[in-house]
Image (cartoon, helix red, strand yellow):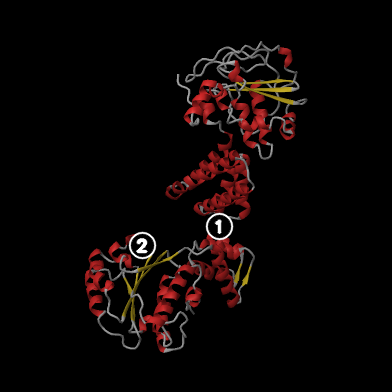
């Protein structure tokens, strides 16, 4: 009893799946050969394993030697066609494994053998598989005979490593690429095989087998053979996952959801469950990356904002960068846990410009793993050790080490009574506002805004934000959405009575703080406008130098 891969091996060019370009070119070449009697005598089929290279070489041998040929549709019943089914028993179809006959002596023997005319067929066809395994001397010995073979000889070379074939050989042959077969085509072929075999198929199971084939039809058929045996004549999704070591889709989606909301406890629990199941970590990682990629595609098709898309892209890039570490590490569970916990925290990190400006300094508390247990009492005075103001009063912020000292804020100190009884203390106020903003659908990236503020004050019914001037572009979403009822409702859940957000930015002057930047004033200068008009130029970049 033969395997499915051999039983359903292609016998005609039309049976090949996923190689339409090469099939069309070969069919046209055979048609011209029938009309003119001339055909190219050296071919090179290049592509990954299991895509049909050797099968196509045998089909070409049958098409050239068929009693009705050369033809793209050989009859399959004449003696040359039947001989092509078993090349080892035919004198005129010679298959050579270059991996075992790679020496220069073998190449010289082949060069002498080529002069022998075919015994029964129209052409003597030499199929050299894995031709890249030949030595340099063997390639050199074959150069002349491949370039000018006898009229009765046809060479068909096959390789999975096209880059290892010398350029001198490539220039003497016609190269036909054999590409990876799409998953949908493999799935359709597997369904056709199951129907002919009378095998019952469970929905979704063949898709898993097709994906496991990774573009190779032979690999997919081999896996299908094993799955049918494991399922007692049926193709069941559970049997497929068990045979291939694929983690359940429910667990993969659970990890994906935990990454989205930053639930580190759920991620650690999922890793523990995977370890108890004895799951293959590399297979799980591949499934997770594919699920993440599908989610990123859905977000892109939904026309999400650039910050949301970049957030997903950064997380996916981190997962991909850890794939090699996972393969090479002796502790794959540790690699997976570290990567997942890191990716879960990426959306909550402060932007780089805020870090450079010192706005996100030591005074901003780190984000805890959960919401605050409850609002503590209001401190009687502002803490003295914090570099940024942490009380209801608004003193001048302390200068950062890498930034020039700021001028004291001209605003008068706020009275202590402006903070209502029971309101969160300033450090907890930042955390509570961050958690609230992360609950707003589509605007979760705003959750980092409270941590970037140099001054955050709650004066019912207004919540005041003050930011460094150089992060204004980063926080343009917060400015645009400050009247969004969903944003106000989310903040009102932790600050009862909230009705309005007030957002301001620091700057070198009062005009710049209001948005009148030096470059804006330069553009309004009449002399500068005259210069642009006379020169016909335009402003490409404005830089401020100290």
Residue 500 screen position, x and y as percent: 73, 25
Tell me the residue at 50%/64% (across/down): 181
Sequence-first disc among 2 and 1: 2
The kind of secondary structure element at disc 1 is: loop
The crowding category of the residue bearing disc 1, from other C-alpha atoms within 10 Å (few below 14, some 14 to 19, many at least 20), is many
Residue 457 tag number: none
The kind of secondary structure element at disc 2 is: helix
Residue 237 quadrant:
bottom right
Residue ID for mark 2:
162
Q: Nearer the viewer, mark 2 or mark 1?
A: 2
Q: Is residue 98 left or right of residue 381?
A: left
Q: In this view, does 412 lie to the left or right of 361?
A: right
How far apart are the two marked residues, 2 and 1, measured between alpha carbons? 32 Å
Tell me the residue at 56%/31% (across/down): 350
Query: Up-down: is 395 above or below 269?
Result: above
Query: Up-down: is 268 above or below 294?
Result: above
Residue 318 screen position, x and y as percent: 50, 43
Query: Up-down: is 18 above or below 386?
Result: below
Residue 536 screen position, x and y as percent: 49, 31
Q: Identify the image quadrant of the C terminus.
A: top left
Tell me the residue at 44%/46% (across/down): 325
Residue 412 screen position, x and y as percent: 66, 10
Residue ID for mark 1:
246
Residue 388 can be seen in this image: yes
Residue 25 quadrant:
bottom left
Query: Up-down: is 436 above or below 38?
Result: above
């Amino acid at each position: 009893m033969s395997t499915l891969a051999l039983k359903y091996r292609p016998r005609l060019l039309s049976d090949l799946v996923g190689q339409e370009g090469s099939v069309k070119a070969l069919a046209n070449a055979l048609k011209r050969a029938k009309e003119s009697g001339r055909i190219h005598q050296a071919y090179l089929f290049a592509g990954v394993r299991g895509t049909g290279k050797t099968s196509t070489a045998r089909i070409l041998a049958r098409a050239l030697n068929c009693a009705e040929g050369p033809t793209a549709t050989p009859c399959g019943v004449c003696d040359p066609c039947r001989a092509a089914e078993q090349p080892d028993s035919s004198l005129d179809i010679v298959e050579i494994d270059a991996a075992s006959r790679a020496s220069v002596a073998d190449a010289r023997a082949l060069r002498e053998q080529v002069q022998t005319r075919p015994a029964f067929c129209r052409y003597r066809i030499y199929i050299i598989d894995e031709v890249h395994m030949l030595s340099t001397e063997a390639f050199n010995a074959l150069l002349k005979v491949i370039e000018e073979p006898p009229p009765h000889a046809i060479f068909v070379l096959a390789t999975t490593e096209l880059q290892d074939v010398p350029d001198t050989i490539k220039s003497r042959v016609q190269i036909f690429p054999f590409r990876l077969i799409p998953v949908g085509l493999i799935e359709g072929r597997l369904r056709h095989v199951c129907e002919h075999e009378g095998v019952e198929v469970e929905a979704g199971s063949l898709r898993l087998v097709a994906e496991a084939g990774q573009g190779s039809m032979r690999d997919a058929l081999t896996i299908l053979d094993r799955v049918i045996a494991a399922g007692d004549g049926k193709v069941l999704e559970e049997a497929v996952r068990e045979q291939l070591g694929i983690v359940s889709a429910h667990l993969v989606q659970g990890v994906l959801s935990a990454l989205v909301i930053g639930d580190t406890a759920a991620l650690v629990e999922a890793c523990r469950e995977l370890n108890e199941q004895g799951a293959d970590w590399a297979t799980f990682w591949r499934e997770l990356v594919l699920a993440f990629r599908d989610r990123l595609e859905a977000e892109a098709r939904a026309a999400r904002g650039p910050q949301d898309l970049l957030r997903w892209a950064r997380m996916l890039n981190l997962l991909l960068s850890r794939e090699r570490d996972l393969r090479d590490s002796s502790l794959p569970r540790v690699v997976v846990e570290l990567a997942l916990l890191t990716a879960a925290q990426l959306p909550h990190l402060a932007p780089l410009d805020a870090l450079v400006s010192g706005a996100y300094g030591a005074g901003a508390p780190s984000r805890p793993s959960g919401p605050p247990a409850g609002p503590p009492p209001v401190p009687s005075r502002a803490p003295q050790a914090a570099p940024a103001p942490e009380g209801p009063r608004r003193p001048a912020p302390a200068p950062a080490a890498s930034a020039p000292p700021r001028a004291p804020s001209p605003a008068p100190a706020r009275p202590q009574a402006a903070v209502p009884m029971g309101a969160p203390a300033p450090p907890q106020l930042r955390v509570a506002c961050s958690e609230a903003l992360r609950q707003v659908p589509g605007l979760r990236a705003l959750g980092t805004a409270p941590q970037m503020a140099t001054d955050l004050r709650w004066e019912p019914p207004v919540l005041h934000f003050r930011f460094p001037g150089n992060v204004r572009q980063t926080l343009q979403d917060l400015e645009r959405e400050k009247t969004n009822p969903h944003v106000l409702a989310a903040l009102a859940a932790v600050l009862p009575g909230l009705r309005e957000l007030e957002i301001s930015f620091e700057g070198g002057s009062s005009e710049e703080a209001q948005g009148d930047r030096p470059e804006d004033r330069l553009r309004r200068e009449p002399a500068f406008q005259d210069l642009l008009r006379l020169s016909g130029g335009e402003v490409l970049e404005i830089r401020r130098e100290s």
